[in-house]
Image: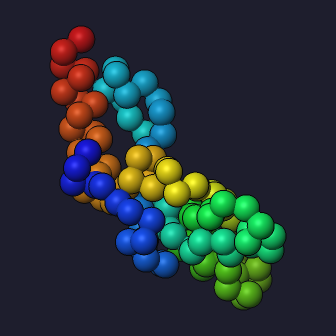
Amino acid sequence: MAEGLLRPSALEVGRAYYCLLEEDWGAGRPRVEPMIYLGANILPGDERRPVQHYFQDAVSYYWRGAATDRESAARHPEILIGLVPMQEADIGVRVVTLEGAIAAFQQARARARMH
């Protein structure tokens, strides 16, 4: 997945990234979730543990704005905000760029054809 290789230092707040979820990749049925990067160690107490990078699901980000924005609580309260913490080791492996997500789909498709 060289095209989607991503380093934690390259993450940009407010930019979309893609989480690769394990769902029978070998059979050619990958699952990818778009997420918006919110930043590192944004919650109280984060400074006491290894760096956590936080992502928000794209739907709640669209309708409510960033979870870090004070006014997001008032916008569409019926839509739950999904925050996903990731460790540095996940960046570039489970969290990739659009190019990385495309490469993952292409690899899954090639594996499925071999079976």
Q: Quadrant of residue 44?
A: bottom right
Task: Identify the residue shown where x is 19% and y is 27%.
Answer: 110
Q: Position of residue 89 (x, y in %)?
A: 50, 51
Q: Position of residue 43 (x, y in %)?
A: 74, 72
Task: Identify the residue shown where x is 50% and y is 68%.
Answer: 36
Task: Identify the residue shown where x is 21% and y is 54%.
Answer: 3
Q: Position of residue 16 (x, y in %)?
A: 42, 68
Q: Quadrant of the C terminus?
A: top left
Q: Quadrant of the N terminus?
A: top left
Which residue extends farthest top?
Answer: 115
| Vertical side of 106 occupied by 69: above or below | below
Q: Is residue 101 left or right of residue 43?
A: left
| Vertical side of 43 occupied by 92: above or below | above
What colour-coding does the image apply?
rainbow
Q: Which residue occupies the foreground of this view, 108 or 2?
A: 2
Q: Is residue 35 visible?
A: yes
| Vertical side of 85 occupied by 69: above or below | below
